[in-house]
Image: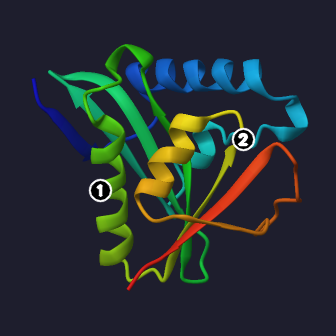
Amino acid sequence: MSITIALEPPRQEGVLRLLDMSDAHAQSLYPPESNHLVDVSTLEKPAVSFFVARHNGTVVGCCALVEAGDGTAEIKRMFVDPDARGLKAASKLMDTLEATATEKKLRAVRLETGIYQPEAIALYRKYGYLEIEAFGSYQPDPLSLFMEKQLT
């Protein structure tokens, strides 16, 4: 009954199912201009580390660490199957993602999440992420929350 986390390709059946679920969830909460989801081809780029959480071999969660090329990276496509919540998959994904960022000697990890996702916001706050202004190509959006954690 343990959760395993590994680097895996995003283009596989279980992950694509999760990404579809993530898309549907985001679309149910936010208008298109406030959805900043990236597609599978973006997740396959060399600057992306894509992590998959499995429970007894079944894909239950995923997230990507997308390096910006300036010593920072962004968390994208963090999602856990609602049926698998409570198994600590999100925490294990975060632990692995941050360990990878530290190994890569990145100075900060950033993210954008929506204001109507209290569970995600609570997870990021628990991990020490603080609110910042919009970064990169993002524009300020009242439905978005931008966060960052400085790494030592």
Q: Which mark is residue 95?
A: 1
**Amino acid at circle 1:** Asp
Q: Is residue 139 left or right of residue 42?
A: right
Distance between mark 2 and mark 1 Cα atoms: 23 Å
Q: Which residue is drawn at 84% across and 39% down?
A: 34
What percent of the width, then of the height, locates residue 117? 62, 34
Picture mark count: 2
Compare marks 2 and 1 and give the one earlier in the sequence: 1
Q: Which residue corresponds to the image point at 78% horizontal and 37% vertical from the top-left?
A: 35
Kindly identify the residue that appears in the image at 59 percent across and 20 percent down.
20
Residue 3 in picture, x, y percent from top left: 18, 33
Q: Which amino acid does label 2 sit on?
A: Ile
Q: Quadrant of the N terminus?
A: top left
Residue 58 figure quarter: top left
Q: Is residue 92 left or right of residue 119?
A: left
Where is 122 relative to 101, above or below?
A: above
Q: Residue at position x 62%, y 48% from top?
A: 42
Residue 20 shows in this picture: yes
Mark 2, other Cα within 10 Å: few <14 / some 14–19 / many ≥20:
some
- Residue 76, image x, y percentages: 57, 49
Q: Does residue 76 sit above or below 132 in this rendering?
A: above
Determine the secondary structure under disc 1: helix
Q: Mark 2 = which residue?
A: 115
